Amino acid sequence: MQLRIEMDCEKRIALIGLRSLESLGVRSVIHELGDLSVAVFSDFRDFSPFSVKTDAYVVSGDVFIGNMDYFMPRKQKTVVVGNGGGAGGGRQMPAMIYPDSDESEIQAALRGIVASVKEDDVIPGELSQREKEVLRLIASGKLNKEIADELCISVNTVITHRKNLSAKLGIKSASGLSLYAIMNGLI
């Protein structure tokens, strides 16, 4: 599928890893629900440079599973297009739609992310300068002891900063934190 980005609207929804017919259908429903831009990406790698400019996501199951560190903190703004039939994800998972979903189920799931995009988001706690420093060092592959030595702080303080980063960003793994740092221009 060719990369296609519509830049005419301030709010943008990314469709990532969907088949052509799925992409066309989802775009059609989204345009009926609101005046929003839709950007289509063949895979997560193509999407990454645009991630900071994206307000909501409709992704294939494979893309979601392969990038859970990115999507789980954004589950309220994500709809997963599954391969088979089944019920939606519930509180711990994002909304799900399937090829055999009822039209009203598809519209309700997409309406949910459209509504989330139209609301003004409250930005989670800003990162302190020290948290940004710790995040940069995590992204560079340093261990807690190495970070502590470089910043002249205790290992316990490094662990506390990591916990605070995980809580603020909703990302637990070092690879997820590294991806966040890269995508947000911190390194």
Image (spheres, rainbow, N blue to C red):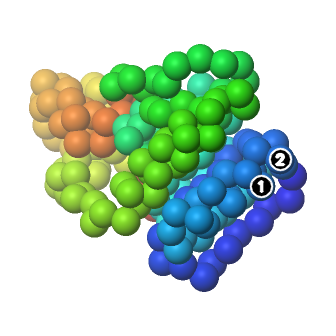
Residue placed under numbered mark 2 in the picture: 21
Residue at 48% across, 44% down: 108
Quarter of the image holding residue 3? bottom right
Viewer-proximal residue among 76 and 134: 76
Residue at 53% across, 74% down: 35
Residue 111: % across, % down: 47, 52
Task: Say if mark 1 contacts mark 2, CB within 8 Å.
Answer: yes
- Identify the element where label 2 is drawn: helix
Residue type, label 1: Leu
The dot on residue 86 is none
Viewer-proximal residue among 178 and 99: 99
The residues tagged by marks 1 and 2 sit, at their Cα atoms, a distance apart of 5 Å
Residue type, label 2: Leu
Residue 124: % across, % down: 22, 52
Relative to 76, residue 23 above or below: below
Residue 43: % across, % down: 73, 45
Residue 79: % across, % down: 53, 40
Residue 23 visible in the picture? yes
The dot on residue 24 is 1
Residue 143 visible in the picture? no
Viewer-proximal residue among 66 and 31: 31
Residue at 71% across, 19% down: 84
Relative to 4, residue 56 above or below: above
- Identify the element where label 1 is drawn: helix
